[in-house]
Image (spheres, rainbow, N blue to C red):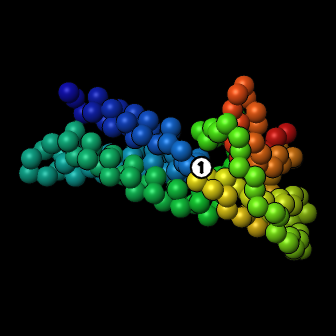
Amino acid sequence: MNTKTIFSLALALAALGTGGCVGNGPNTERGALGGAVLGAIAGGAIGNNSGHGNGAHGALIGAAAGAVVGGTMGNQVDQRNGTIYRSEREATTQVVVESPPPPPPPRQVVIVERTRPDAVWIEGHWEFDGRGYFWVNGYWDVPPPEYRHYVAPHWERRGNVHVYIRGYWRG
């Protein structure tokens, strides 16, 4: 295999490795892909300049290491900021049950001062992660460009089952 083929294979594997995992957000995927690109470039240069002159092998190792580091850093951003879903399709989870468990009663919500004039208040709510509910405090959030309405997390009946839909933005 030539260097270009191995480099392309490494990038494709990095992109595929993060795209279908539950809980990944856009920053995780961008971080993994960006890390793979930078890692492949650095690894290729190091491998080519080493005594062995094997740039393709270095690019493959660099891409894999870069994808892991970049994906981890991006995932931290997604976890801190919350993932932005821009459609019901993106927000649909793999949590499917015959009957959804009822959420605990709502907690007392305190609305703090608006952070920006274009910010939208997201009510405090219970999220479901497949094992149980956890509380998310209310907060002000600035909608993504071209989006203005927030759809709260909810269960949706589809045939004989219920599917959990995370909160998402719509235009």
Q: Label 1 crowding class (10 Å Cα cut-off): few <14, some 14-19, many 20+?
A: few
Nearer to the camera, 71 or 166: 166
Image quadrant where residue 40 sits: top left
Amino acid carrying label 1: it is Gly
Counting from the top left corner in percent of width and height, residue 59 is at: 27, 43
Counting from the top left corner in percent of width and height, residue 155 is at: 75, 42
Counting from the top left corner in percent of width and height, residue 30 is at: 52, 47
Quarter in which the N terminus is drawn: top left
Nearer to the camera, 109 or 103: 103
In the rendered view, would you say 34 is above or below 106? above
Counting from the top left corner in percent of width and height, residue 50 is at: 13, 52
Q: Secondary structure at mark 1?
A: loop
163 vs 30, left or right, is right
Quarter in which the C terminus is drawn: top right
Image quadrant where residue 17 sits: top left
Q: Which residue is mark 1?
A: 130
User: What residue is shown at x 52% (from left), y 50% (from top)?
Assistant: 28
In the rendered view, would you say 77 is above or below 149? below
User: What residue is shown at x 82% (from left), y 69% (from top)?
Assistant: 107
How many marks do you count on the picture? 1
User: What residue is shown at x 47% (from left), y 42% (from top)?
Assistant: 18
8 vs 130, left or right, is left
2 vs 137, left or right, is left
In the rendered view, would you say 135 is above or below 58? below
Single out the residue that lies furthest toward the left.
51
Query: Is residue 52 visible in this depiction of the protein?
Result: yes
User: What residue is shown at x 48% (from left), y 60% (from top)?
Assistant: 73
Query: Is residue 92 visible in this depiction of the protein?
Result: no
